Amino acid sequence: MFIAMVILFVLGYLAIALEHPLKIEKAASALILGSVLWALYALFSEQILGLGFSPSWEEMKMMAREIIQNIMPVMNSDAFATSPFNETVELASHTNAFVKFELAHHLVATAEILFFLFGAMTIVEVIDQHQGFTVVTNKISTNSKVKLLWILSILTFFMSAVLDNLTTTIVMIALLRKLISDKPTRWIYASMIVIAANSGGAWSPIGDVTTIMLWIGGQITTVNIILKVIIPSLVSMIVPLTILSFMVSGNVTRPERPAYAGELTTPFERTFILILGVCLLLFVPVFKTVTHLPPYMGMLFGLGVLWLVSEIMHRDKEDEIRKKLTIYHIVKRVDTPTIFFFLGILSAVAALQSAGHLSLLAGWLDEKLGNIYLINLAIGALSAVVDNVPLVAGAMGMYDVVTPDMLRIAADPAYASFFVQDGLFWEFLAYCAGTGGSMLIIGSAAGVAAMGLERIDFIWYMKKISLLALTGYLAGAGAYWLQAQLLA
């Protein structure tokens, strides 16, 4: 069943990739895939856990006891003695309980992403419904495809370093819809936004989930990651952007404004909601830094503030207009299938992580490659297929941060120096894991969001954009290697 899970993941992945030829919504395929993988893991947990790729039996019992003691302190000793984690209970009960614990653990992480996504999408919809993005689009006077491509890409690159690549992509896709009417052209721009967002998130400690993990884990520091990774990240965006500039020509066709566009909101309301919405999105990393709570809490706080302000702003307006502008009605426009798609694909990857597939893969890379550059390049390439978070988590688990004392007694100090805080391995890991996902539309949170919002075809992206993203990825990697040689 261990191998069967991999085969089913590949089949489910193909169903998602062939969404348009099959005419089956990718959210349905993702939900079925995630559910079936977890069902197999639960039904055959003894066999899978017995392969040795997952936590040992003793580790399972220790983790289970810790969960009970931390989450269920009210349990008395008698209840614990008869709990499913007692040594006298059959192995099947233990493994089944462990699978449930793993599922609950991943549910928390997945829910954080979904709540974050839902809050961000709702805030963007509120700005859009108030015609807030017209304030920006009216300032962009050019209709040249090339100039517009550069403006949007550079704006995305720096925005994603402050917001994060997921939020930035959602905002920029909404802005894109106000600038370009025809879908084929918009797909090209949306794809470039994905590349720019992932590149921009790689050099900032708060720009991507993986850089946040490395930052919080102590592998990287703020100033160093900015100074050492910004140039490779910029190269990874500029190279495909330059190539794409020769592939587009002429002017874009802007969409017609709805007849009611000037009637729902005043110029002041449009500007105010735009500024407030963007400030609330920018406040999310500040909220996280100050409170140390997950980012979704800051996003929900921002949504609550925007909800309150919009209710007060429109309470004296006519019912017909007020209904169109209050979040109670705007929330119905949020793209729910995209959220379900996220839920399904994240659940599927989580099943492979819990069953040990990704840990096995990380160990294989370390054994077969043995070179920090090759290992990280492989991790970046794999992040285009599976989520980069468990891959980076696996790398963080495989290697400890080398302290000065450890470095002095290391058998190979030169190799050990790659793993000190701000060492080459961690810096390059941040770059590769952040930008590698651009090679496939499903390889990053930004890509999945764009795919859901714009209904971008997986095969189209692979034919038109994947090679460009790969070129940028390798060019940025080369820039990092050259920079490391010059600074050595």
Image (tube, rainbow, N blue to C red):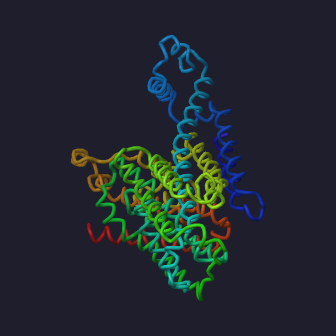
Seen in the picture, residue 78 relative to 472 is either above or below; the reply is above
Q: Horizontal and vertical percent for residue 258?
A: 66, 73
Q: Horizontal and vertical percent for residue 266?
A: 53, 69
- In the picture, measured across the screen, residue 459 lies left or right of residue 437, that is right
Residue 374 lies in quadrant = bottom left
Q: Is residue 159 visible?
A: yes
Residue at the spot 33% in from the left edge and 63% down from the top edge: 226
Seen in the picture, residue 125 relative to 190 is either above or below; the reply is above
Nearest to the observer: residue 274 or residue 395: 274
Count of numbered badges drawn on the protein: 0
Residue at the spot 62% in from the left edge and 72% down from the top edge: 187
Q: Quadrant of the N terminus?
A: top right
Residue at the spot 52% in from the left edge and 56% down from the top edge: 310
Nearest to the observer: residue 118 or residue 411: 118
Q: Quadrant of the C terminus?
A: bottom left
Q: Horizontal and vertical percent for residue 462?
A: 63, 69
Residue found farthest to the right: 22
- In the picture, measured across the screen, residue 111 lies left or right of residue 260, that is left
Nearest to the observer: residue 230 or residue 74: 74
Q: Horizontal and vertical percent for residue 379?
A: 49, 57
